[in-house]
Image: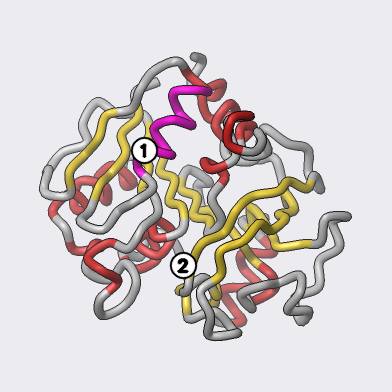
Amino acid sequence: MKAGVVVFPGTNRERDMAHALTLASGQAPKMLWHQEESVDGLDLVIIPGGFSFGDYLRSGAMAAHSPIMTAVRRFAEKGGYILGVCNGFQILTEAQLLPGALLRNAGMRFLSQDCHLKVEGRDSIYTKGWSAGDVFRTPMAHGDGNYTASPEMLDRLEGEGRVAFRYCREDGHVQADDPHINLNGSARAIAGVLSENRRICGMMPHPENLTDPAIGGTDGLPLFKAIVEAFGV
């Protein structure tokens, strides 16, 4: 599997993402500077977290217009696989590669803590590492993670099985109006969504930060192992 990790000014999770991919595949990904104009030859493009361009205007808004995003759009049009995490999710929505938007957290505070996610389905390479309904722990670190979309789009995401992950309690209980469970106030407690062809996934929490026992656990490793297995590595 040939993977690339996009790096913008202000990105700060690229090394974490590279470490997670290397643990899962044994191969280090290619680092892609935002001014590059091609992602040719890659199987997977990852847009990691951080504060691209200082989160000026809106989180991800400036990064969505970087030269490399033209190449990423072409890659998507050809059916390429793309994972965006945290700021990467924000960039994918700003680039209109995923529906919806990420607003300020409901409590108007930056959240840096562990949360629990419920896996909603197994029909994507990003969720096949778990069974539907499984719960895993993962860190979150964002100020603009409150996912929103029109009621019609939310219904469509639900109806098409495109909700990948939801915020939940450790026992799997989901309650969107409980700020102790749905920490950032996301619509319907949505933590991650998929594109129509299920080849693009965006999620706010950071599974890459729980892939190594040396740094607290391997709860996020199934995501990366499933991606690697999907490409026959």
Marks 1 and 2 in Cβ contact (< 8 Å)? no
Which residue corresponds to the image point at 81% horizontal and 48% vertical from the top-left? 133
Find residue 118 and report its horizontal and vertical position in percent: 75, 53
Which residue corresponds to the image point at 32% horizontal and 39% vertical from the top-left? 5
The reply, left or right, for residue 50 in relation to residue 73 is: right
Considering only vertical position in the picture, is 209 above or below 103?
A: above
Near mark 2 (Cα within 10 A), the count class, few <14, some 14-19 or many ≥20, is: many
Residue numbers of the magenta segment = 14-23
> The residue under label 1 is which amino acid type?
Arg
Q: Which quadrant of the structure image shows residue 122?
A: top right
What is the magenta segment's predominant secondary structure?
helix
Which residue corresponds to the image point at 35% horizontal and 29% vertical from the top-left? 3
Near mark 1 (Cα within 10 A), the count class, few <14, some 14-19 or many ≥20, is: some
Say which of marks 1 and 2 sits in front. Answer: 1
The reply, left or right, for residue 47 in relation to residue 199 is: left
* Residue 163 forms part of the magenta stretch: no
Q: How is the image coloured?
A: secondary structure
Q: Which quadrant of the structure image shows residue 31?
A: top left
Given residues 88 and 137, the one toward you in this image is: 137
Considering only vertical position in the picture, is 70 above or below 231?
A: below
> The residue under label 2 is which amino acid type?
Pro
The reply, left or right, for residue 121 in relation to residue 151 is: right
Find residue 181 and report its horizontal and vertical position in percent: 76, 70
Q: Secondary structure at mark 1?
A: helix
Q: Which residue is mark 1?
A: 15
| In the image, farthest residue toward the front | 214
The mark nearer the N terminus, 1 or 2, is 1
Q: Secondary structure at mark 2?
A: loop
Circle on res. 99? 2
Find residue 27 and report its horizontal and vertical position in percent: 39, 18
Which residue corresponds to the image point at 61% horizontal and 56% vertical from the top-left? 162
